[in-house]
Image (cartoon, grey):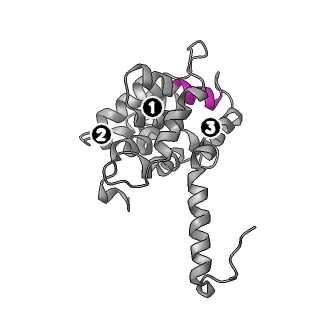
């Protein structure tokens, strides 16, 4: 196994960092495989629903595709709850961070805020402020996030709905997650640091 020789970063040589760069490129190329594995892991996530989280994600993505959404929104619907396992109290932000380098800013904003917007559909029953999303009223992507939650996310808990399998979405997922990160033709320059 190839390894660097240093034990402290400030002792690394140009050869060490060239090796790390080469290995990182290989690792980045396998990102779609890790995202697919993480999606499959959603089968063993939050309990209590009539569907596991993978089925919820597949149903959300299927609904997005049926509605004519573009590839970025379909993939976003597919991965929108990936944060449930590692960041259950801010899963939206984790999912947004995963997809941010590969999609337009609007899609990232939708995923980052879908948790707040989703409360509109269950807040009253859970003793929460269902209108928390109103603080974003007037934002240029408010309506897009509202649609994402209204038509795809909150609707996707139906065990009788026929969803596409994960294999159907795999080519779309691979297309998005193999893009050049922060490609200026997709990502606005101010989004890089955001």
Point out the image quarter for the N terminus: bottom right
Q: Residue 96, position in %: x, y?
A: 46, 47
Of the image marks 2 and 3, the number of the one nearer the N terminus:
3
The disc placed on residue 66 is none
Quadrant of res 7:
bottom right
**Looking at the image, can residue 127 be seen?**
no
Label 3–label 1 contact, CB within 8 A = no
Please give left or right for residue 88 compared with residue 194 in the image: right
Q: Earlier in the sequence, mark 3 or mark 1?
A: 3
**Magenta segment range?**
52-59
Query: What residue sits right under mark 2 in the picture?
Result: 141
Count residues near mark 2 (Cα–Cα under 10 Å), then give few for <14, some for 14-19, many for 20+. some
Tell me, yes or no, whether the two marked residues, 2 and 3, touch with CB atoms within 8 Å.
no
Q: Measure the C-alpha gap from mark 2 to mark 3.
A: 26 Å
- Callout 2 secondary element: loop
Quarter of the C terminus within the rendering = bottom left
């Amino acid at each position: 196994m190839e390894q660097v020789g240093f034990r402290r970063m400030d002792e690394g040589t140009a050869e060490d960092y060239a090796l790390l760069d080469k290995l990182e490129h290989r690792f980045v190329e396998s990102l779609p495989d890790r995202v697919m594995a993480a999606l499959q892991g959603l089968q063993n996530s939050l309990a209590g629903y009539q569907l596991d989280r993978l089925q919820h994600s597949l149903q959300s993505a299927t609904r997005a595709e049926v509605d004519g959404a573009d590839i970025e929104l379909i993939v976003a619907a597919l991965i929108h709850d990936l944060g449930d396992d590692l960041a259950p109290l801010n899963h939206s932000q984790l999912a947004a961070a995963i997809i941010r380098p590969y999609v337009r800013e609007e899609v990232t904003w939708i995923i980052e805020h879908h948790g707040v917007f989703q409360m509109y559909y269950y807040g009253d029953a859970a003793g929460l402020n269902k209108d928390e999303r109103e603080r974003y009223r007037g934002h240029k992507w408010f309506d897009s996030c509202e649609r994402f939650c209204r038509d795809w996310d909150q609707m996707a808990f139906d065990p009788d709905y026929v969803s596409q399998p994960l294999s159907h979405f795999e080519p779309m997922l691979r297309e998005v997650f193999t893009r050049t990160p922060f490609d200026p033709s997709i990502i606005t320059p101010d989004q890089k640091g955001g």
